[in-house]
Image: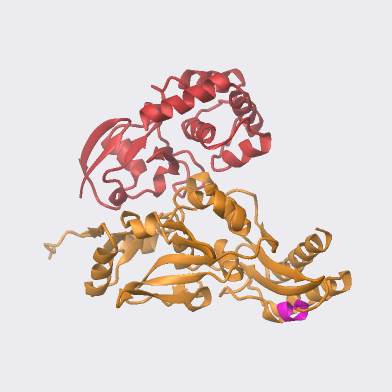
Chain colours: A orange, B red
């Protein structure tokens, strides 16, 4: 017997503002599919086909257009296209690590659509902005708002593993606050993939550091694409923190991070390759810091 | 769902599934077949169009995001005053063989000329065209063509002028 319901009866919502979005998130019993730049969503055929309630986040200005530079950092709408960040003079000046990372994602066509919120919500361990947001200690603002306030969470509270986030019950990423590192901070991001454009990373590494009187005052190290969750290499960080940066210390750090990470083997690379390259990338980063 | 948007400067009203890709709307509903499908996954750039003045892969834009937007395809680009000079450069450098990727390259070329400060270095051109794949001509001739265009102030000025009129 044929159903009277059309097979593909999708519902589409394009909320005009945050209040409409929050009401929709709170009042819809069924799970909704949030759509931002759609660059990951449309190629995940099963997920895209089965999506029944589609909510267009690019219709909401607070998510698609917010780019507020403050004294201590920048507040970025979760659906703001990466190319806007790449072109923004103050973000280029204060967050070069983020701009360089965004430039290495996909292609200009992708950067014109893809967003930080999408990269986080897609929750791929190979999401290139994730290690960078981790070392920058970005703060994620999660909706719908409770008593007018977004919930503030860190990246590791949201991204739990491949395709897994804590964003259940129609919660969404609204905005991302990124504190500015000191102007003289050392930064490094490198991704290793099959080719430069449009390649998914095999391994990546983000490093942010600050020296004080020839000693490492602060260092944050986060590998990407190697583990299911995005986690900083805290043991290696503590081996370096408070120490002078010397060749000997760099070699120790390389050995330490190779022990600390437990990479996966998948279609793009192997455990052994990822372990070695993570060590080599850290070595390269620290030598660059030593010599500059 | 009913969608009203602008294609090549003209208002268009269609009734399509919200999940239908812009690429398919252009080719099937609007008979604008200059935009090609290569990979359908945002990797090859053959389906590049301008969407609200930015180049995007039309295979990754769902219909539900189209209402109120403005799209320019190669059919629209052909009417731009700057277009003949760009076409001539590609032809003179032998940068077109089978031509399948060419409409995507043309869209990316005007977008690159608009986006960047000039003149472009070879590396900047490579980065700017990194989202377009060519499987037969090879890239040297394409890069030669775009490098020449990027040194021509008259073409650049015309691209900027066209941009204001056509987007």
Q: What type of secondary structure mainly makes up the magenta span?
A: helix
Residue drawn where x is 61% and y is 53% of the image: A93
Say above or below: A207 vs B145.
Answer: below
**Residue A106 visible to an observer of this rendering:** no
Say if the magenta span includes residue A239: yes
Q: Is residue B162 above or below residue B67?
A: above
Residue depicted at x 33% and y 60%: A49
Residue B8 position in % (x across, y down)? 33, 30
Judged left or right of residue A271, residue A214 is: right
* Residue B10 percent across, percent down from the top left: 26, 30
Position of residue A149 measured from the top left corner of the image (x, y, whole percent): 35, 75
What residue sits 65% from the left and 50% below the top? A195
Inspect the magenta stretch and tell me whether residue A274 lies in it. no
Q: Quadrant of the N terminus of chain A?
A: bottom left
Q: Residue B120: which quarter of the image?
A: top right
Of A256 and A90, the residue lying toward us = A90
């Amino acid at each position: 017997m044929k159903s009277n319901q059309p097979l593909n009866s999708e519902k589409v919502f394009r909320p005009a503002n945050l209040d409409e979005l929050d009401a929709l998130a709170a009042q819809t019993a069924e799970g909704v599919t949030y759509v931002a730049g759609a660059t990951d969503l449309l190629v995940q055929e099963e997920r895209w086909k089965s999506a029944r309630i589609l909510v267009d986040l690019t219709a909401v200005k607070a998510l698609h257009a917010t780019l507020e530079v403050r004294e201590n950092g920048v507040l970025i709408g979760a659906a703001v296209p990466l190319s806007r960040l790449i072109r923004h003079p103050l973000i280029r000046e204060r967050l070069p690590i983020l701009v360089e990372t965004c430039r290495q994602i996909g292609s200009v066509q992708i950067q014109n659509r893809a967003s930080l919120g999408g990269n986080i919500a897609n929750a791929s361990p190979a999401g290139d902005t994730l290690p960078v947001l981790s070392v920058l200690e970005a703060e994620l603002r999660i909706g719908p708002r409770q008593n007018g306030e977004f919930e503030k969470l860190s990246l590791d509270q949201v991204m739990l593993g491949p395709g897994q986030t804590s964003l259940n019950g129609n919660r969404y990423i609204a905005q991302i606050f990124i504190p500015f590192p000191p102007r003289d901070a050392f930064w490094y991001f490198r991704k290793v993939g099959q080719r430069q454009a449009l390649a998914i990373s095999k391994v990546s590494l983000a490093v942010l550091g600050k020296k004080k009187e020839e000693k490492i005052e602060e260092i944050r190290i986060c590998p990407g694409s190697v583990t299911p969750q995005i986690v900083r290499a805290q043991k290696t960080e503590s081996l370096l923190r408070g120490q002078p940066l010397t060749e000997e210390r760099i070699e120790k750090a390389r050995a330490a991070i190779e022990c600390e990470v437990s990479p996966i083997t998948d279609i793009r690379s192997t455990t052994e390759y990822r372990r070695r390259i993570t060590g080599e990338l850290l070595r390269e980063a620290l030598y660059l810091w030593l010599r500059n | 769902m009913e969608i009203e948007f602008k294609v090549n400067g003209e208002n268009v009203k269609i009734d399509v599934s919200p999940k239908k890709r812009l690429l398919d709307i252009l080719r099937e509903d609007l008979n604008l077949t200059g935009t090609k499908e290569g990979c359908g996954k945002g990797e090859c750039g053959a389906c590049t169009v301008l969407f609200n003045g930015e180049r995007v892969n039309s295979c990754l834009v769902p219909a539900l995001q189209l209402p109120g937007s403005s799209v320019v395809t190669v059919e629209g680009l052909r009417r731009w005053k700057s277009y003949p000079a760009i076409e001539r450069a590609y032809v003179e450098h032998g940068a077109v063989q089978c031509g399948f990727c060419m409409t995507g390259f043309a869209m990316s070329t005007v977008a690159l000329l608009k986006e960047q400060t000039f003149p472009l270095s070879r590396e900047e051109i490579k980065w700017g065209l990194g989202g377009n794949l060519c499987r037969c001509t090879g890239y040297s001739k394409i890069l030669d063509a775009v490098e020449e265009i990027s040194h021509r102030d008259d073409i650049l000025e015309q691209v900027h002028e066209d941009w204001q009129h056509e987007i």
